[in-house]
């Protein structure tokens, strides 16, 4: 499968590295606004084509899948352009600037019979599925509480600071605990409460979000771009709890009983970078003629964007 990449930043390099170590995958072409930068990218990763415009990449008949790795605010127009040209798309999180844009893209994918999926890598990881299964296996009894925290000291990055780039902690980091909570506790969320601290440019720098579920479960989540933290997730039940080391790329889950004695320890299978699973999911879907992935269905992406819309409205933040 020949893959084209839009954007030549850090995340694009990580995808190129991943593809270079996968069987039956080729990092084929790169498009960047600066052609010289695209050319340098092809030389680093031994790619065949460099383009100075995104449209040229989408017009290349050899490209089977386009991976969009640009700032959030650019995703809608770039993905729309690719879909209208009949290209399959894997678009980085956060998917779009709002739920309406997400719904429009999903409709376009269906109409043009193209694969479209949000590239939130944790959704596709086998170990994420293992964690969700363990939570309901009885090993910690009945799960009732989930806490998830993710923070990196990245406040000074331009993509974080600027509202027009859909900056802030929620779009860059908050989607991870939100997705994790929905993977583990489901989607029957009865009530959402939240708070945030905003920076001088108007984006959220720290936030706390609480999901209250119809069956009594609670998921408490916090993210920050002002500091670093342990990135842990803890799922607590009537007979014990499970500590996951890194919500952003879980490598280990330790189960404790009610007396805080370790009962079991689970490890993530060896991986390239963790990005490979979303590519494998795309390959399967495209080969079967699917327009969406069962790991991250269109409706789930749209519903999460609706949650983000509601949070931003409450916080009086306008992005994009």
Image (cartoon, helix red, strand yellow):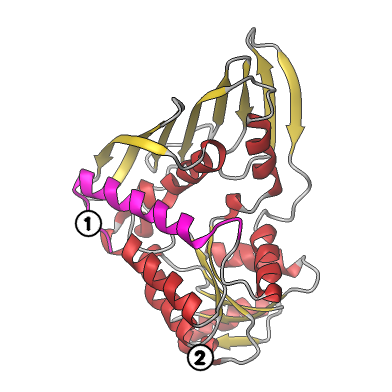
12 or 177: nearer the viewer: 177
Q: Position of residue 1 (x, y in %)?
A: 72, 78
The answer to which of 77 and 273 lies nearer the viewer is 77
Q: Is residue 27 left or right of residue 81?
A: right
Mark 2 or 1 closer to N-term? Answer: 2
Image height check: is 122 above or below 299?
Answer: above
Which residue does the image show at 71% across and 75% down from the upper left?
287
Furthest toward the left, the residue is 316
Percent position of residue 245, x then y = 62, 33
Look at mark 1 in the image and give the residue it sits on: 318
Residue 61 versus residue 102 in the image, above or below: below
Is residue 302 shown in magenta? yes
Q: Position of residue 13 (x, y in %)?
A: 60, 66
Q: Main secondary structure of the magenta part?
A: helix
Label 2, on which residue? 56
* Residue at image point 22% right, 44% down: 314
């Amino acid at each position: 499968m020949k893959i084209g990449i839009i954007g030549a930043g850090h995340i694009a390099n990580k995808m190129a590295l991943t593809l270079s170590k996968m069987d039956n995958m080729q990092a084929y072409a790169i498009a960047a606004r600066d052609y010289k930068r695209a050319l340098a990218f092809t030389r680093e990763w031994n790619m065949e084509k460099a383009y100075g415009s995104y449209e040229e990449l989408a017009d290349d008949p050899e490209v089977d899948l386009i991976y969009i790795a640009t700032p959030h605010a650019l995703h809608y127009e770039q993905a729309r352009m690719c879909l209208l040209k009949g290209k399959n798309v894997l678009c980085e999180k956060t998917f779009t600037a709002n739920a309406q844009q997400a719904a429009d893209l999903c409709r376009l994918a269906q109409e043009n019979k193209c694969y479209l999926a949000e590239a939130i890598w944790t959704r596709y990881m086998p170990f994420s599925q293992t964690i969700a299964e363990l939570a309901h296996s009885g090993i910690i009894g009945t799960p009732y509480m989930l806490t998830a925290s993710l923070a990196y000291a990245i406040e000074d990055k331009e993509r974080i600071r600027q509202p027009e780039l859909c900056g802030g902690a929620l779009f860059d980091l908050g989607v991870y605990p939100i997705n994790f909570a929905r993977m583990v506790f489901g989607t029957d969320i009865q009530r959402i409460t939240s708070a945030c601290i905003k920076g001088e440019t108007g984006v959220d720098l720290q936030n706390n979000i609480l999901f209250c579920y119809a069956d009594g479960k609670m998921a408490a989540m916090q993210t920050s771009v002002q500091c670093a933290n342990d990135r842990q997730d803890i799922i607590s039940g009537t007979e014990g709890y499970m500590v996951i080391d890194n919500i952003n790329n879980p490598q280990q889950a330790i189960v404790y009983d009610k007396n805080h004695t370790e009962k079991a320890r689970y490890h993530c299978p060896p991986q390239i970078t963790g990005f490979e699973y979303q590519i494998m999911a795309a390959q399967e879907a495209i080969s079967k003629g699917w327009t969406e992935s069962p790991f991250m269905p269109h409706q789930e992406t749209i519903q999460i964007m609706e949650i983000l819309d509601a949070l931003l409205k409450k916080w009086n933040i306008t992005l994009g």
